[in-house]
Structures are given as structure tokens and as C-alpha cells.
Image: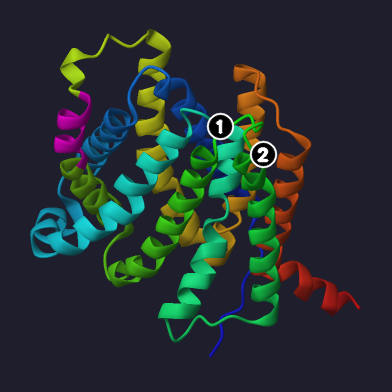
Amino acid sequence: MTTAVTKPSAAAWALILLLGLIWGGSFFFARVAVLEVPPFTLVFLRLFIAALALHIYLRGRFGLYETLVARWRSFIVMGFLNNALPHTLIFFGQTEIGAGLASILNATTPIWTVLIANSFTSDEKLTAAKLAGCLAGLAGTAVLIGPGITAAASAPFWALVLPVLAAVSYGIASIFGKRFRDLAAPVSATGQLTASTLMMLPVSLMADQPWMLPVPSTNAVLAILALALLSTAFAYLLYFRILAVAGATNASLVTLVVPPSAILLGAVFLGERLEATDMIGMLLIGFGLVLLDGRLLRNRSKMA
């Protein structure tokens, strides 16, 4: 039995575009903050403030506390794969690369999700269109990180690879996260953020000794608050609203919106500029995502 994918309404499109702008903003805010706050501590602050905000928002509804106790092991795994590890990788990468490039590399998440699902699930196998999309996306990734192998590249190879590894982690998390389908979505979000906060606290204390760090500037503090409250806590609630009104397939369209918004914010406020190879890589990844989504090809075949 298959479920037809409905076209997003005007209101749903507005929510998708808003979420794309907010998640694109996360790369911008991170780039501002990571220049003054070490990555481990920045990850902890993002997760802690976002988790606290969601706890205040939920106030124990939907059996939150009982669920946290009963399923803490699963939340630890999800928090590591979906929060602690990928955020850390992206922030370390952003010590060397800009918001736009980091967002493009991380936009490969759906590609890795498809490849991982094909290997470890029985109901999400590769089709010809999905394979073509993965190949196009991987080609775009190669175009982006390839110059990093040479000494003349503007960014070190490791900084380009880290957001891609974060995308792989997100892909694994999306498969593992299927076990939370029976929970209210805000509970899943709060659970994983709570677990990842507790995970990152000792790491931040041991690695960065944050009490010894200089006081960050006003801009960095505002960037941290925006990263936690807007691009994490509020973004989760907005994403779950899109899932409810438009479905998972339509919600995945936000992946196409994030890089342009991050590039625009980086260009306007940080003076970032992408190289020609970056643009080519972004177009290839975007083309791959369109193929993975599949609706453009289906619509063309109906019109033929």
C-alpha cells in the first residue's frame, strides 16, 4: 500500500521556507560564535539552552519524565548521533570554513541516509532514480572537498571532510530514530537534547575549561542564543509542525532551502564568497536531492 504525496499548501511552503532560513542561519550563527567560543563548549551551550527551553515549553506533558527514565539508553544513542557528534564536527569545521560551504557539505545528509537505509533496512532500497541522485550528490561532494587535498586550497582538507562526516552521522540517526515513532515528536526532541547535553558537559569542562575562557563579545552571546533558541529549540517545533501538516516527504524539501539561506547570510553579514567549484558542487548536490525526492521526474512523466 502506498500513500500519495500531496503538494504542500501555501502555508506549508511558508513554514518550509522559514525553517530553511532558520537552519541556514544555524551555520551563520555558529560561524560567528565559534571564532570566540571553542567548539566543545559551543556545542554544550547550544544543546543545554535548547533542552532547557523545550523542558519549559513541555512542562512535563506527554509523559516526558517517565519516557526519559524508561528510554534513556535510546536517547543517549540518538543524542550522540543526531546532536553531540555532528554539531561538534560541524563547529570544528567552521573554525576554518564559512557558513555557506559548511551548509552545502552538510546538505548531503539525505544522500547518506539513502545509502545507509539501503544497507541496513529492508523497506528502503535503492531505485535507479535514487542511485542517480546519490551519484550526483557524491560527485558534488567530491568537487567541493577535492581542492582541499592540495596545499594551495583555501581551506584544509580536514575542515571540508568534517561536515560530510556530520551528514553521515545525521543519516545514521535518521534510521535509528525510527524507534521513536510512538512518541510525541517534542518528547523525542527534548529527550535527545537532554541526553546530548549531559554528554557534552564533561567534555566541555575537561577540554575547554570554560571558566578560563575570555568573556565572549555581545555578538557571540547573541549568536549562541539564536543558535540554541531559534535554530534548535524553535526549529524542532517548527519541523514537527511541518511533519504534521505536510508529511515527511514534503518536510525533506527544507534540505534544498538551507544552503542558499546560509550562503546569503554569510555573504551579506560575513563577506563570504564561494568559489566556482563550490557553486558547481552545490548544483550537483541540489540536482541529486531533486532526483532523490523524485517528484519532479514524476510530474514530468505525467505531463509527457
Name the element at disc 1.
Answer: helix
Vertical comparison of 121 with 153: above or below: below
Q: Position of residue 176 (x, y in %)?
A: 33, 68
Q: Does label 1 or label 2 sit earlier along the sequence?
A: 1
| Numbered disc total | 2
Query: Can the viewer see residue 258 in this picture?
Result: no
> In which quadrant of the rendered view does residue 209 lie?
top left
In space, the residues marked 1 and 2 are separated at their CA atoms by 10 Å
As shown in the figure, which amino acid type bears the numbered disc 1? Answer: Ala
| Picture residue at 65% right of the left edge, 18% below the top | 271
**Within 10 Å of the Cα at label 2, are there few (<14), some (14-19), or many (20+) other Cα atoms?**
some
| Picture residue at 11% right of the left edge, 54% below the top | 65
**The C terminus lies in quadrant:** bottom right
Q: Magenta span covers which residues?
A: 200-208
Front residue (pair 71, 30): 30
Q: Is residue 99 left or right of residue 71?
A: right
Q: Is residue 5 left or right of residue 78?
A: right
| Picture residue at 32% right of the left edge, 29% below the top | 42
Q: Main secondary structure of the magenta part?
A: helix
Q: Position of residue 90 (x, y in %)?
A: 44, 40
Q: Position of residue 20 (x, y in %)?
A: 57, 43
Q: Is residue 25 left or right of residue 64?
A: right
Look at the numbered discs 1 and 2 and tell me whether their residues touch, using CB distance below 8 Å: no
| Picture residue at 15% right of the left edge, 42% below the top | 198
Front residue (pair 201, 235): 201
Q: Is residue 203 magenta?
A: yes
Give the colour scheme of this rendering.
Answer: rainbow
Name the element at disc 2.
Answer: helix
> In the rendered image, which residue does mark 2 sit on?
260
As shown in the figure, which amino acid type bears the numbered disc 2? Answer: Pro
> In the rendered image, which residue does mark 1 sit on?
99
Front residue (pair 63, 139): 139
